[in-house]
Image: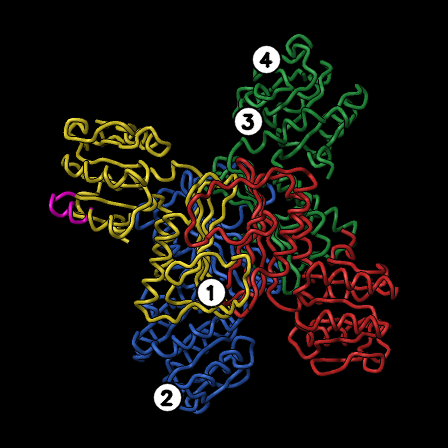
Chain colours: A red, B yellow, C blue, D green
Amino acid sequence: MIAVAVTGAKGRMGSTVVEAVKAAPDMQLVAQLDAGDEINTDTVCAAQVAVDFSTPSVTESNVHALLDAGVHVVVGTTGWNEEAYERVRVHADSSGLSVLIAPNFAISAVLAMKFAAIAATYFESAEIIEMHHPNKVDAPSGTALATARGIAAARKKAGCAPIPDATESDPAGTRGGNIEGIPVHAVRLRGLTASEEILLGNPGEQLVIRSDSFDRIAFMPGVLLAIRTLTQHPGLTVGLDVLMGL
Amino acid sequence: MIAVAVTGAKGRMGSTVVEAVKAAPDMQLVAQLDAGDEINTDTVCAAQVAVDFSTPSVTESNVHALLDAGVHVVVGTTGWNEEAYERVRVHADSSGLSVLIAPNFAISAVLAMKFAAIAATYFESAEIIEMHHPNKVDAPSGTALATARGIAAARKKAGCAPIPDATESDPAGTRGGNIEGIPVHAVRLRGLTASEEILLGNPGEQLVIRSDSFDRIAFMPGVLLAIRTLTQHPGLTVGLDVLMGL
Amino acid sequence: MIAVAVTGAKGRMGSTVVEAVKAAPDMQLVAQLDAGDEINTDTVCAAQVAVDFSTPSVTESNVHALLDAGVHVVVGTTGWNEEAYERVRVHADSSGLSVLIAPNFAISAVLAMKFAAIAATYFESAEIIEMHHPNKVDAPSGTALATARGIAAARKKAGCAPIPDATESDPAGTRGGNIEGIPVHAVRLRGLTASEEILLGNPGEQLVIRSDSFDRIAFMPGVLLAIRTLTQHPGLTVGLDVLMGL
Amino acid sequence: MIAVAVTGAKGRMGSTVVEAVKAAPDMQLVAQLDAGDEINTDTVCAAQVAVDFSTPSVTESNVHALLDAGVHVVVGTTGWNEEAYERVRVHADSSGLSVLIAPNFAISAVLAMKFAAIAATYFESAEIIEMHHPNKVDAPSGTALATARGIAAARKKAGCAPIPDATESDPAGTRGGNIEGIPVHAVRLRGLTASEEILLGNPGEQLVIRSDSFDRIAFMPGVLLAIRTLTQHPGLTVGLDVLMGL
């Protein structure tokens, strides 16, 4: 039995994780913490692994507090940057603990990101369209950012030419954002949950990779997989794909 | 037999129109004019209808010259604005001739625009993604602009609420352009010709209307239909849908 | 206040209707009936309108019983044929009551069907792909059947040629079903609720109309609209589009 | 310089290959053969590699004749089965020559097939929709067959459960074909060239991988890559992915 704590336990994702951990035959839920609760060796109740779905403003301090309390951490909260990664990497290495930070726990989204990075070196053009419900406050999504960066890194490594674009006039800004050379578009539409479409183009052909998450339950298999396999990857890991062995 | 002149006859669209008119059993091609050729009663060679696929910088002066030469005009060139429409409207009315200016002659695109305007009043959210080859110099496409304006006008008339959007942070500009309240995104991808996707959303449901033009031949049935039916609509007409009776 | 009864009230759709009627400010839920409950003037409790989401095997007898009890009826159950329609038409006419039988109450699906019928006469090819969760026992969906019939009727009226298809060899039956000349394909995929895609093709162009229902709440606006406007359409009406004025 | 022969050189694909080989700076076109031409050491004119885009009825005998003439062979013709593969395998092995038989040379289609096989083990449901122009005589496409077999083999190896499907009634056959447990649907639509969509589903999520070939030029990079790298893979190779190192 793996002893599991959840931080951000009252949020929508956190409470879904609470239910999923309770339902998992090989896990025991030992602590539920939320805003206002201190994180220390007492409050984590001997948890081996903690799952953090809190908010961008507190997630990094949660992770450091959990490491101080001797707990491995699975992080689903977005809003991380390279500097924050580096601070967690140092802390995890010195403590001998494991941290996974993943922009997305949906298997379909993780596969889409991985496939996009593999495929992108074979195509002249690559663009990303992410689509979410209209209550989302930030754009683009963490998944789209990670996908764009993965594509950009793969193309740079393979020596690909810049993406062709003859646009001279775009007064309204319809060409969207540019993330490390990859155009990214964010759609907000009532009825959708979270979708991402990666478009890759060559003369005479197109490859489209699309992932749709219709419901938060789509993320639970990935969260449970992370809880189970995290400790095989000491230090900081970014992206569920590493734990999936992709 | 309808006597037809083509202006911009050496361009990619113009030369396709030349072939389509030659192949039409009820039409006779009487003049092919391009940059450098003057447009007057002599050079139009008694054409009854002219088709202009020239460039944004000369299309309006072409239309006025054709009206002065006593010729009805079908215009496929983009780059028009309200002031230019008004000048052509006055000229066409005073001359008793007909002018059709259409942002798109593909039947699929015209139907998509029409359906989008009808459907948009039933949904909370509406966004447009237009996709073209990466050699296109302007964004968004004339079709996307016309679609956005049609949706905006229909929603205003029906008293629809503004489209919901909680975005607070979008440093890269991924939310795209805003055309009269309708978000518009422009994708440029090698391999594509011209596509448009209209997304409409309500709680629990989505309607997607998509048109794809894979080849310039897709525009020819609409151009021929315009040549044949234009004179039944005196003055200025904007949009092929009017001639299709939609 | 409209007095409403629900038959099939314990089913998934029926119970969603029960909640929607309770939440509607202009309606009063007066009766909930399910399998085993008799339908008569006593049990319908003076309902003006009944909503039937029962099962194919009992829906027609439910409708006749409700008409006998003097109640207008909105029917969402599938499995109807022309003979059953005719029996209800006669009964409704003689009783002076209204019956709406609709294969789909989602606004997106109703619009998709309507647009498909309008557009289908402009294209050489038309095919339907319907996609549902894998627990569905019948294929194709009632919506796909109604869409195919609507397209077939529009093409017949317009004198369209048969859809081109050079297939000579298809040992596995991958070309799907043929409903009045329109190819129909049924996909069953975990994760989906109910989607329909109508593909229309011409040389060089394609029009795709797609509706997605992600959740049963997508059907409630259409059900409430039917309850409110049904009595303006005496006799039998098939399809929500008639009540929407499309 | 690689000396290249083309068999089926007058067909649509064959003539496109002829042009692509002529345009390749590292290749020399030494022979063009078509129906009626004998294939032997004289007629292949010292070709090192031959490309066969002939017809299902003659492709196997072409390959054996080319091997007898001492030429490596790249085959794009469809219609092969296991027995024919085996005969070619034996012949290639005994002759020390290389044969590549690929159902599709479009990079997008090859990647789609590969990704589908990797992803399919993570999902409950998997279905394939292939879409082609309506002049195609066989269904499903060779690409769809290969994709289905690749998915089936991967799922079998991983011990996946059968795909869920509760269908009890499907009088028109809309559930399509079943290729080794994978449902396959074939659409024929004017305007399309060759597209394939692979749908993968789990509770609450969906992954869609789609490849579109709009034009025969999409296949040329793959054909040239095969001509250049074929000899590094002695014996029979099935699928361009092996030569791409995927």
In this rendering, does residue A102 appear at all? yes
Residue drawn at (48%, 80%) of the image: C20
Q: Position of residue B57 (x, y in %)?
A: 31, 39
Mark 4 sits on what residue? D37
Q: Do the residues at pointers 3 and 1 share their chain? A: no
Given contact means CB atoms under 8 Å apart, are the residues at marks 1 and 4 in contact? no
Query: Element at badge 1?
Result: strand
The residue type indicated by label 4 comes to Asp
Residue B168 vs D75, above or below: the answer is: below
Q: Chain of mark 4?
A: D
**Reading the chain from its start, which is encountered first: label 3 or label 4?**
3
Q: Nearer the viewer, mark 2 or mark 4?
A: 2
Q: Which mark is residue C1?
A: 2
The residue type indicated by label 3 comes to Met
Residues in magenta, as a range: B88-97
Q: Residues within 10 Å of mark 4 (few under 14, many from 20)?
A: few
Q: Residues within 10 Å of mark 3 (few under 14, many from 20)?
A: some
Query: Element at badge 3?
Result: helix
Q: Do the residues at pointers 2 and 3 share their chain? A: no
Q: Rounded to the nearest whole Å, what is the CA distance between mark 2 and mark 1?
A: 30 Å
Query: Element at badge 4?
Result: loop
Q: Position of residue D60 (x, y in %)?
A: 67, 24
Q: Is residue C99 left or right of residue A160?
A: left
Q: Rounded to the nearest whole Å, what is the CA distance between mark 3 and mark 1?
A: 43 Å
Q: Nearer the viewer, residue A152 or D190?
A: A152
